[in-house]
Amino acid sequence: MDLALQLLFTGIGIGAVYALVALGFVLIFRATNVVNFAQGEFSMVAAYLMVVAVEAGLPYWAAFIVALLGMALVGVVFNLGVYYPLRHRTYLPVIIATIGASILLANSVLAIYGPQPQVLEGWFETPGIQVGPVYLDSQYLLIIGVTICLVIFNFWFFEKTLLGKKLQATSQDKEMASLLGISVSTMIMITFIYSAVLGGLAGILVAPVLFVSIQMGSTIALKAFAATIIGGFGDVAGAIIGGLALGVIETFGAAYISVPYKDGFAFLVLIAFLIFRPQGIFGERVAEKA
Amino acid sequence: MRLTRRDFATGIAAGIAAPYLIRSANAQGATIKIGMCAPVTGPAAESGGYAIKGAKLALEAVNKAGGILGKQGELIVEDDQTTNPGIVLAFSKLASQPDIVGFLGSIRSTQVHAMAPDVIKLGKPVMIGGTDPKLTHMGNQWLFRFRPNDSYSGRVIAEFGVNTLGKKKWAVLHSTDAFGTAGGNALTGALEKLGCTTFDQGYANQSQDFTPVVLAIKQSGADILGSYFTFENDLGIFARQLRQLGVNIPWVGSPSIVNITALKLAGPALHNTYGVADYAENSSEGSKAFGKIYRDSVKVAPDNQSSWTFDAINVLSAGINKAGSTDPGKIREAILGIKKFPGAEGEYNFDQNGDGLHGYNIVKNEKGAIVFDKHIEFND
């Protein structure tokens, strides 16, 4: 029982990271109908920005704000440089452009900062607390807390605010939104900024656990992408549930079946969903008329 | 001036022949070229940088001392991207240059396995740092190893843990790649010969979480841990989680446990651990000398990432000079004939398989400082 509780906590912690990145995938997919394969690199860039800001002598909270502002700027540049010029093309060139941008971001950071993995201290001085038989890593506690807050914020923002409703309208039908006077390009810009900040937030939060390295983004993004499919592509709640489920499944699979095949469990679940429920947990079945 | 048909034909012939003549001139040219596959990008990019620096420092010294066959040595580096396909591509690019006389391969056994078939096809000497014992025992006469292989590291870890630390209930943790599997098998084999019980646990490289691994070790009741980690990131994450989850048993690791990157990432989580190290700064005069050169130049403490490439360039250069030729067969014979060669990693005595080193150092992490304990040499 003690073992299961410890695994559950860790699984939820790592799953929350997948969920945060998956959320970025979903928001951009809803707004543009393309998958942004650079979403993982947003996490990596933000973590490096945080390291640079801390090394520059900024207090941790100020470095955090600077890193997130930097990510907002990355979102603007990404939208204008990668999505906007291709917005009238089919989804394929845009997806390829995001893959290219992902490689560009990774190699730019490598060229600027070098290959050295970096250590980023966590937000708390205490690495964790022991509650009965379970050790609660303070960074994972923070990640879980932030994910819960974001779920509540997203619900409030998309359901209760005018801007959120405009973003939803844009994601559902761009032409109709445009006819209603909504600036579609502005809404897409806001979506890219929000997604970049979300990805960045995930990167900054997970950096004290996984270290800051060029590869950290791609490692997380692959799992987050799987989580997005499991949850139901395009569904915000699905991304969260998919991410958490994936984290828990791979942690328990590793502990009770096989550690070397830990990644395999995540992708086995993904394949099972693609075969038996391709629309994911929350996705709706789309049928074509004959 | 009139252009005759003969002038035109001569001009065309010269135009066609010129690139070949220039290439041929380069082949017999002013420098002796050595190719190097190194991880410039990918998860091992940092250690790749150290490896390149080690090789360059050695070549500078060789050139100052008169060079190779009276010419200056030149290092041509190709990025292996820290992947198997990457090193195959990098090596094929280098192999296509006929004027490269020898090569430095990878410190990662899995990459050496990937490039080994192309090494046989090319038929030129390749210096390697991979420690899977099979690499020099699978009929590939062109591979020369500049680190002691894992049959030695396994025996040294086992003997130290059992005879010095007095522990007989082992957890053996290893990566599931070629290096980790070979190391894990070597350690388990050595422990069984010493009458120990072992709990074997593999893990996949680039894991983000080691909680299941730590809990499995905890539940196994092991009183000592032996490890073979391939990547420093993994080692850093594991070390931190091991201590956080309250596992404080003695830990004797393969050389990556004293790697500079691992020490930086894991910090205090690695304090009081032991490691077998092919490079230990105070283990010999050659090690001390390399340590000084490296620190003066790179401003970082040296480790095996740079020491093996340093030795590889020195031995390869000495081999070519001894052979008096760039003929691959003659260089091979010359390297195999090298005995009592003082290197940064120790004294090189090449056997007929191409293994130059036959022992390991035991070191301890004392609050982040790597302290040399003793050297254990084998005669087989």
Image (cartoon, coloured by chain):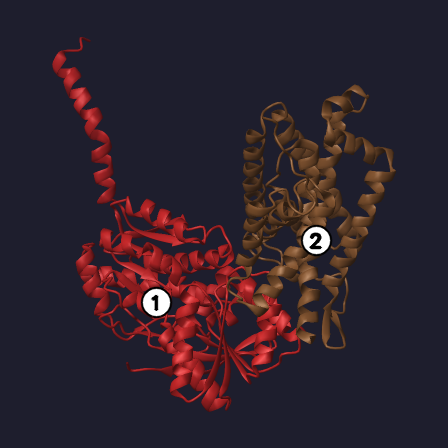
Chain colours: A brown, B red
Does residue A214 show up?
A: no
Secondary structure under the numbered disc 2 in the rendered image: helix
Q: Nearer the viewer, residue A250 or B146?
A: A250
Kind of residue at disc 2: Ile
* Chain ID of residue with mark 2: A
Give how far across and how far down residue B127 sits, in percent.
Answer: 32, 61
- Number of other residues with Cα within 10 Å of mark 1, as a class: few under 14, some 14 to 19, many 20 or more: many
**Tags 2 and 1 both on a single chain:** no
Q: CA distance from mark 2 to mark 1?
A: 40 Å
Task: Give residue B326's mark.
Answer: none
Q: Quadrant of residue A80?
A: top right
Q: Position of residue B184 (x, y in %)?
A: 43, 73
Residue B329 image position (x, y, % from top left): 18, 59
Numbered marks: total: 2
Q: Is residue B321 above or below residue A181?
A: below
Q: Which residue is mark 2?
A: A204
From the viewer's side, name the closer residue of A154 and A202. Answer: A154
Residue B315 lies in quadrant: bottom left
Q: In the picture provided, is A158 more to the left or to the right than B290? A: right
Of the residues shown, which amino acid type is indicated by label 1? Phe
SS type, badge 1: loop
Front in this rendered view, residue A76 or B374: A76
Disc 1 target residue: B146
Q: Quadrant of the C terminus of chain A?
A: top right
In the picture as drawn, the residue positioned furthest to the top comes out as B2
Nearer mark to the viewer, of 2 and 1:
2
**Crowd rating for badge 2 (residues with CA inside 10 Å; few <14, some 14–19, many 20+):** many
Q: Residue at x 39, y 65 (%)?
A: B308
Coordinates of residue B189 in the picture (x, y in percent): 38, 80
- Host chain of mark 1: B
Residue under the point 19% across and 21% down = B12
